[in-house]
Amino acid sequence: MTRVLLLGGTTEAAALARHFAEGGIDAVYSYAGRTETPAAQPLPVRIGGFGGIDGLVAYLGAESITHIVDATHPFAATMSRNAVAAAERAGVRLCAYERPAWEAEDGDDWTHVADLAGAVAALPEEPSCIFLAIGRQHLSAFAALPWHRYILRLVDAPTGALPLPDAQVVVAKGPFTAEDDTALLKSRRVNLIVAKNSGGSGARAKLVAARALGLPVIMIDRPVLPPRQSVSSIDGIMRFLAHPADLGV
Ligand code: 3Y8
Ligand code: NAP
């Protein structure tokens, strides 16, 4: 009997959840619990970490999970690595639902960097107004360059002090629109954007806005993940659930 653990937290995971619910697929939607009010889902939801690989192996057994669908964000690398290891140990099939990385188009001015440290190293010397659209978890890396003004977009209002002396917070949860992001970048006089190559539609708006305004973007490339079965469509996930062997490893 198929029972799916859907590792979520993205727009694509929400679309899959709707598809599973409409199709009567026995699935549970999993959030890490990073945000105060995660979006409701049409599936039973669990919130919080599993307790590393061992905790996830125990969960898979206790919940009689037969398939893992990893629809987490491409930068949720620890979760994805743990899921591959736990699936292997528990003898559970796993398939990732990956969205293609963004690629620069005509009119884009992107500088690719390998990781967060690369983004910090790529910042200009002269004081600038930088839109840090990378969330809350990694802001301290930019404290090394306190002379910049940082515009921060966060899902929840910050609780403690921010690690950046000159920072303005915009509290907003995506998906975002190019129109709103263009207005935001103009009104805050942003002259540089730092983004993760998340892919998908939910965060692309700032890139469309940057192109329209002729602003440079420092693009952080995705972390490397272990080899695993992956698809980039709902049909691909449905084929995985119906005939896992067809897709090979
Ligand atoms: C908790 C669930 C939906 C899903 C919405 C997508 C789109 C908007 C783009 C910008 C970039 C950022 C951030 C972002 C995007 C979608 C999608 C996506 C980027 C929620 C959500 C959870 C999270 C966690 C949160 C991180 C943060 C990252 C904000 C819900 C809204 C910057 C990533 O405060 C924190 O600790 C936030 C942590 C991980 C990155 C970071 O390091 O701070 N996402 N985002 C999930 C969980 O608990 O399991 O609250 O409803 C989901 C979404 N975030 O409803 O359609 O699918 O990509 N999320 C990045 O891409 O750089 C915003 O502002 O332009
Ligand atoms: P991460 O660094 O890869 O994972 C750190 C730990 O958080 C994991 O080891 C696991 O804890 C727990 N965790 C992560 N995702 C989980 C999930 N879906 N369900 C249960 N536990 C989870 O993760 P992250 O980058 O902080 O992302 C956390 C969540 O936010 C994910 O759902 C992701 O899809 C979503 N998200 C992340 C980003 C981003 O930029 N990173 C962007 C948009 C959405 P244990 O080890 O205890 O099991």
Image (tube, helix red, strand yellow):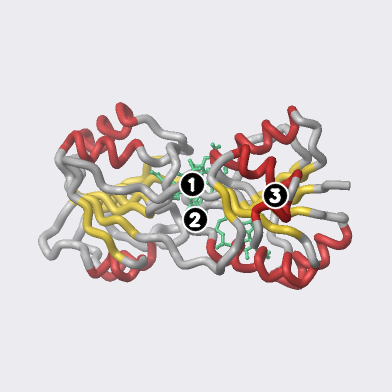
| Viewer-closest of 85 and 36 | 85
Locate residue 116, reporting x and y percent. Answer: 36, 66
Identify residue for label 1.
99
Q: Is mark 2 within 8 Å of ligand 2?
A: yes
Residue pushed farthest left? 126
Q: Left or right? Give the position of 191 relative to 69.
A: left
Identify residue for label 2.
74
Identify residue for label 3.
30
Which quadrant, please, contains the C terminus? bottom right
Locate residue 209, reporting x and y percent. Answer: 26, 36
Q: Is mark 1 within 8 Å of ligand 1?
A: yes
Helix, strand, or loop for circle 3? strand
Characterize the local packing of mark 3: few (<14), some (14-19) or many (20 or more) Cα atoms within 10 angstroms.
many
Residue pushed farthest front? 246
Q: Residue at x 17, y 44 (%)?
A: 215
State if disc 2 and disc 1 touch (CB < 8 Å): yes
